[in-house]
Image (spheres, grey):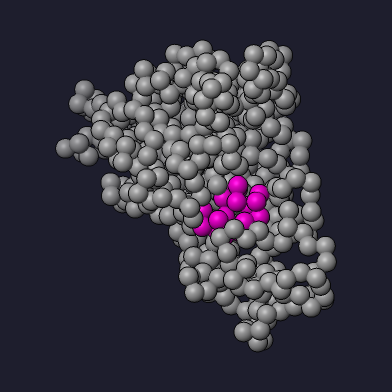
């Protein structure tokens, strides 16, 4: 009967509207997957790493595809703040700016006078731009469930672009408070708050404590405990896999997940979740597990569908470190989350008639596959695969050598920390060396500092499900937002 009434609810003249309700209309959902830094070379290398040259990622099966131009308003090579903001708002922005109007200029945050902690206050002056509506804010306005899931910390640039507005991505104390319903600085466009927020733990949610741990000594200079505040607003708080799995789901469930295993320190991880290569699967959830849990929570709300954003954030971090192995493993974990989401949707929406899934990246990196390598096959415990030294394709058991007679790896970077000035004097590279977990691939240019840069190449987008055929050709990143809105009929 319900399906019959749904079919006739649009026919007002027959006098049966009294039998119809909004619950009879199918819920429309969108899941937006963002592989941070996942350029096309990274996708290709991850496919080979996980499945061999003739293998297939779930991403490869998406029927509708496009290429995305990623430049920001003022930079040829973008950073994550304006690139993710472009997807979430349809507005082109300047470097470092998050979900603000195009005239907004990046303003570096200052330091708190009492604690000396930087990024303490809102750095957007009244005359410096204005907020622009994000996809999650639009979803909230349309009574949709909303969620953000990431392996980075929630206040990092990419997830921040979904729920906050700021003139500089580094003002993370301010970004965090925008997520807290009823609190000072809350982003009121989020209504009663984003329903599901899961990512890495960080100093931005806990109060400053001069005698505490290294993390607490870098805590919030305003003394607020945002975890406690969100719990008071009805959020269930989870910090590991068992507590996430134990969340009781009903129409009112809201969840804050901050997963901190192994990274509650002052290390480079900075509150991000573990790389998938290092993750303890009994304690720290995978991106796939977080994604499907978020889907269950949002589906139970019985709202007008839901909008869920999922970021594979640590792909980017491993690439900055020129550590290809962790980057490729995190790309596989990201792809596994896509596969899990599609499988779960098909349980209730077999043909994805009412669900749109979009997969893309915010920017490229400088990683390349070089030389005329022999086929490597997938990476196993006995073979480094694409992580190994390059073998000559005519004699595939013989390592190739450069003009100085030195061996080199299949994967390399345009810039980064590992640039060898005299390759004639270096220890010859072997599969054991280049296939190791912590190996940093060589780079052509050595930059100051220890971090490789983003690249400016176009990235790939794939889509499946409801109105996915809208995504095709060559698009600017700002064109994706209106296509998602159109696909949802908003």
- In this view of the protein, can residue 16 be seen by the observer? yes
> Residue sitting at 35 percent across and 49 percent down?
282
Q: From where the camera sits, is residue 352 visible?
A: no
Q: In the visual, does 443 lie left or right of 463?
A: right
Please state the horizontal and vertical placement of residue 156, each as a whole percent of the image: 57, 34
Count of numbered circles in the view: 0
* Horizontal and vertical percent position of residue 202: 52, 32
| Residue 269 magenta-highlighted | no
Nearer to the camera, 396 or 429: 429
Residue reaching furthest left? Answer: 1
Which residue is found at the position 52% from the left and 29% from the top? 213
Please state if 340 lies on the left or on the right of 425 as rendered.
Answer: left
Quarter of image, res 164: top right
Residue range of the region highlighted in magenta in the rendering: 315-331
Specify whether 452 is left or right of 291: right
Closer to the camera in the image, 348 or 202: 202
Where does the image place residue 98, in percent across and percent down from the top left? 63, 29
Residue 196 position within the rendered picture, expressed as x and y whole percent measured from the top left: 40, 32
For the N terminus, the image quarter is: top left
- Is 327 magenta? The answer is yes
Furthest-bottom residue in this view: 395
Specify the farthest residue to the front: 211
In percent of the image, x 76 and y 75: which residue is there?
Answer: 406
Give the image quarter of residue 441.
bottom right
The residue drawn where x is 66% and y is 65% is 411
Secondary structure mostly seen in magenta is helix
Residue 472 to residue 260: above or below:
below
């Amino acid at each position: 009967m319900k399906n019959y009434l749904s079919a006739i609810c649009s026919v007002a003249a027959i006098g049966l509207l009294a039998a119809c309700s909004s619950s009879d209309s199918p819920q429309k959902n969108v899941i937006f997957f963002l592989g941070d830094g996942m350029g096309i070379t990274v996708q290709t290398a991850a496919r080979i790493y996980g499945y061999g040259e003739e293998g297939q990622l779930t991403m490869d099966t998406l029927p509708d595809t496009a290429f995305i131009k990623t430049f920001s308003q003022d930079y040829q090579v973008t950073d994550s703040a304006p690139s993710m903001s472009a997807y979430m708002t349809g507005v082109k922005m300047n470097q470092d700016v998050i979900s603000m109007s195009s005239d907004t200029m990046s303003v570096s945050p200052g330091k708190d006078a009492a604690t000396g902690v930087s990024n303490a206050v809102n750095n957007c002056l009244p005359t410096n731009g204005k907020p622009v509506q994000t996809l999650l804010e639009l979803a909230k306005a349309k009574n949709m469930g909303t969620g953000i899931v990431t392996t980075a910390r929630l206040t990092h640039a990419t997830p921040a672009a979904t729920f906050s507005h700021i003139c500089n991505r580094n003002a993370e104390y301010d970004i965090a408070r925008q997520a807290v319903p009823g609190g000072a600085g809350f982003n009121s466009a989020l209504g009663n708050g984003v329903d599901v927020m899961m990512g890495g733990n960080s100093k931005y949610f806990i109060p400053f404590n001069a005698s505490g741990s290294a993390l607490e000594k870098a805590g919030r200079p305003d003394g607020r405990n945002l975890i406690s505040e969100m719990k008071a607003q009805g959020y269930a708080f989870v910090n590991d896999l068992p507590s996430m799995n134990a969340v009781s789901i009903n129409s009112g469930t809201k969840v804050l997940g901050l997963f901190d295993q192994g990274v509650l320190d002052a290390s480079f991880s900075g509150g991000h979740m573990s790389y998938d290569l290092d993750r303890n699967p009994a304690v720290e959830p995978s991106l796939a597990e977080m994604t499907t849990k978020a889907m269950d929570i949002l589906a139970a709300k019985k709202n007008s569908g839901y909008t869920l954003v999922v970021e594979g954030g640590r792909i980017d971090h491993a690439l900055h470190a020129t550590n290809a192995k962790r980057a490729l493993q995190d790309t596989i974990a990201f792809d596994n989350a896509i596969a899990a989401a599609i499988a779960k949707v098909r349980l209730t929406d077999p043909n994805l008639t009412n669900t749109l899934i979009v997969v893309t990246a915010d920017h490229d990196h400088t990683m390349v596959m070089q030389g005329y390598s022999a086929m490597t096959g997938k990476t196993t415990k006995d073979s480094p695969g694409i992580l190994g030294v390059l073998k000559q394709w005519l004699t595939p058991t013989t390592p190739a050598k450069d003009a100085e007679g030195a061996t080199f790896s299949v994967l390399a970077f345009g810039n980064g920390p590992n640039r060898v000035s005299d390759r004639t004097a270096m220890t010859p590279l072997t599969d054991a060396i280049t296939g190791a977990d912590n190996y940093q691939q060589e780079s052509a240019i050595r930059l100051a500092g220890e971090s490789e840069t983003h690249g400016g190449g176009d990235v790939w987008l794939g889509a499946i499900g409801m109105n996915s055929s809208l995504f095709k050709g060559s698009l600017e990143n700002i064109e994706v937002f209106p296509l998602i809105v159109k696909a949802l009929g908003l």
